[in-house]
Amino acid sequence: MAYQLDFSKFPELVSQAHENDVNEAHLTFLDGALHGQWALGGNLILVWASAENAMDLLVIPHYGLSEYAARPGNPADKVNAPDGRSNNADDVIEDVISGSKHVEQDELARFCLLLGYEPTRIELPFTPGIDVPYSMIEMLVKRYGISYVEDRAVALFDIVGFSLLSPLEQVTQLNSLAYSVNSAYSKMLSNDIDISFARTTTGDGFYIWNRDRSIQANVNLYHFMHLVLADNAIANQKSASKMTPSLRAAFHVGGHYEFYQSEGLNPTLYSYIVGDVTIELARMLERALPGQVLVGDFWVPMPDGEHGHVVKIDTVQFIEKTQETLSSLKGLTLSGDHIDSIKCYLTGDRSEANEFGVHKYTIVDKHSRLRDVYNAKINIYRADTEPIFLGRQTSDLEAFETKSIEFVVPPENLSA
């Protein structure tokens, strides 16, 4: 039976089709043509350019980018780079996978020449950008290639002692964690907080990220992590059988590759991620104590309301920014009790000069590599009931193995 797009699995695509009065037969035809070029995962579709009743694609074997990166003499010096753009192999690969899949014809020609492949033309029964919006074409093309995202927040939840559990206990605890994730998602949506989360299992937990790549998406994911941990903590309090998992968690912002695995003979509906940010999270949690919440050492873009542009802020400043937006979670209900307030902060203590600062810890992973982390605390105060305390205080970190500890003074203390 020939492959055909199942629209029931793409509600966002159907919604846009209705909004833009798009003929679904056009989408079916296009996806079938892309599926043929994908060749069951043997090829990647990197970029595309529109033409009248047609589109041109850069299609390469799945190993093509690695071969290009390792090629000793690529033809970079023979190709003109527009706008002073570099023709260095690493820069070209970053350009072709980190930006929009939709490029102009001259840029497509440049990429084809550099990578050594001819463009592939697909004749279409419609005109791209007129009969079908570029954004909808982009949604379909992305499933057949890979992308690179530079600054995305990812959270990792890890079940403590998972390998020591029986198989039945393992699946029970994974299911409990999955429920906490779904419950937190439902609560955020009920408060009109936009988060389109994706997750992939690590075997003993989940990586979770926001499909939205906006700056606010990173902040929302941090709050989402709070609610997942809170739901789990409440379930632990109520569980008589102790089948609710004991968790440790980490949050980091960094780069990663995004791809769609094969599921049967088709690419999956949702993407998977792998890269620096997932590796950092895994290494961070190797040293984390039960119940501990770690935050990575990162720089992330954030809008500067005073000057009207985007600036890079560090981990300490990011956590302060998230504290400013916590009012959006007030009124949410946890186990029948309304949230009065939430406080999230990085732990530390006072210096000899009586300045409060946070501690930045340097840990050594199993590969003897150093990485810097912060210890986080989250306090959730509810009406007419005891608060929920997540994470560990500085005084509770005696068993936390570190190579060194640095005292970091928050910006407001520096200016005081």
Image (spheres, rainbow, N blue to C red):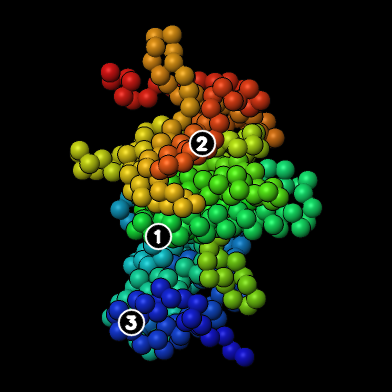
Residue that protrudes farthest toward the front in the picture: 384
Label 1, label 3: how far apart the Cα atoms are: 24 Å
Q: Earlier in the sequence, mark 2 or mark 1?
A: 1
The spot of residue 113 in percent (x, y) is 46, 64
Disc 3 on helix, strand or loop?
helix
The spot of residue 67 in percent (x, y) is 60, 58
Give the residue at mark 2.
389
Q: Amino acid at mark 2?
A: Phe
In which quadrant will I find the N terminus?
Answer: bottom right
Label 2, label 3: how far apart the Cα atoms are: 46 Å
Q: Earlier in the sequence, mark 1 or mark 3?
A: 3
Q: Amino acid at mark 1?
A: Leu
Count residues near mark 1 (Cα–Cα under 10 Å), then give few for <14, some for 14-19, many for 20+: few
Disc 2 on helix, strand or loop?
strand
- In this view, the residue in front, 134 or 235, is 235
Residue shown at 58% from the left, 62% from the top: 64
Residue shown at 40% from the left, 19% from the top: 356
Give the residue at mark 3.
18
The spot of residue 61 in percent (x, y) is 59, 68
Give the residue at mark 1.
189
- In this view, the residue in front, 13 or 291, is 291
Label 2, label 1: how far apart the Cα atoms are: 23 Å
**From where the camera sits, is residue 157 visible?**
no
